[in-house]
Amino acid sequence: MSVLDLTPDQVLATTRAVRRRLDFSRPVERNLIEECLRLAQQAPSGGNRQGWHFVVVTDAAKRRALGDLYRRSWNLYLDDPGYVGKLIFDDEERNAVQKRTATSAQYLADHMYEAPVLVIPCIQQSRAGLSAANQSGLLGSVIQAAWSFCLAARVRGLGTCWTTLHLRYEEEAAAILGIPFRDIVQVAMIPLAYTQGTEFSPAPRDPLESIVHWNAW
Ligand SMILES: Cc1cc2nc3c(=O)[nH]c(=O)nc-3n(C[C@H](O)[C@H](O)[C@H](O)COP(=O)(O)O)c2cc1C
């Protein structure tokens, strides 16, 4: 296994949402994906239940079908008040970042099916018993593992982008992949590919003081 020469802090600071720099022409070896998944399994889960599942999609026809779902949802999202390309900030630099993100996300919507691998992290939970109060426990029991997967991928020269738009059509995605919809909740769809170049930079973020509350809000 060859890994990039990055410190742990560099990995944490440079695991970006990669879209335009995903290399669609290069397959990803199965053993690398399995290494990342084994590391993901080291994440915490509520009650140590380890109810996570990862559907790894390499089949071209299935990727195309999922890409179509994603694109359909993206087209609706363009009119959503939460659309990433809405320039709602007072800060021009922030708006410029949002604009770039929107262009990049449009690219991914157009090309999702071309990613050599699509990974869908899921969690075992009967939909009938899905109370609002349990959402954090439920999602926290898979999202941390899935993010570990993304970090492990970055270390191996692979890029990922956390996406959720396909969830508008989660049941259709379940049918494409044979996921038992009543008992298995999908939380994301993560394209995985080698990156074009391996240099990524920390992204601008809000000042720490604006989000940290010591001892009281
Ligand atoms: C819960 C969640 C949902 C997201 N959904 C999408 C999505 O559907 N499509 C997409 O292109 N990016 C999606 N993203 C990626 C964000 O746009 C990205 O994390 C953000 O722009 C910061 O990117 P950066 O870390 O590269 O700066 C999502 C991220 C999160 C955490």
Image (tube, rainbow, N blue to C red):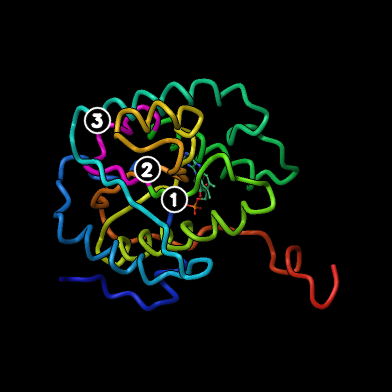
Rounded to the nearest whole Å, what is the CA distance between mark 1 and mark 2? 29 Å
Span colored in magenta: 109-120
Q: Give the amino acid at mark 1.
A: Gln
Percent across and percent down for residue 32 are 19, 61
Location of mark 3 (residue): 62
Q: Residue at x 69, y 52 (%)?
A: 133
Ligand 1 closer than 8 Å to label 2 CB = yes
Q: Secondary structure at mark 1?
A: strand
Closer to the eye: label 3 or 2? 3
- Nearer to me, 92 or 137: 137
Q: Secondary structure at mark 3?
A: helix
Residue 67 left/right relative to 139: left
User: Considering depth in this image, is 127 or 207 the residue closer to the camera?
Assistant: 127
**Residue located at (48% from left, 40% from top):** 164
Q: Which residue is mark 1?
A: 124
Q: Quadrant of residue 6?
A: bottom left
What is the crowding at mark 3: few (fewer than 14 residues within 10 Å), some, or many (at least 20)? Answer: some
Q: CA distance from mark 3 to mark 2?
A: 20 Å
Residue at 69% across, 64% down: 207
Marks 1 & 2, CB-CB < 8 Å contact: no
**Closer to the camera in the image, 70 or 48:** 48
Residue 19: numbered disc: 2
- Give the residue type at disc 3: Lys
* Disc 2: CA contacts within 10 A as few (<14), some (14-19) or many (>=20): many
Tag 2 or tag 1, which sits nearer the N-term? 2
State which mark lies toward you, 1 or 2.
1
Residue type, label 2 = Arg
Q: Give the percent coordinates (x, y) of residue 91.
A: 71, 46
Task: Please tell me in which quadrant of the rendered image residue 208 appears.
Answer: bottom right
Quarter of the image where one finds residue 184: top left
Residue 97 within the magenta-colored segment of the rendering: no
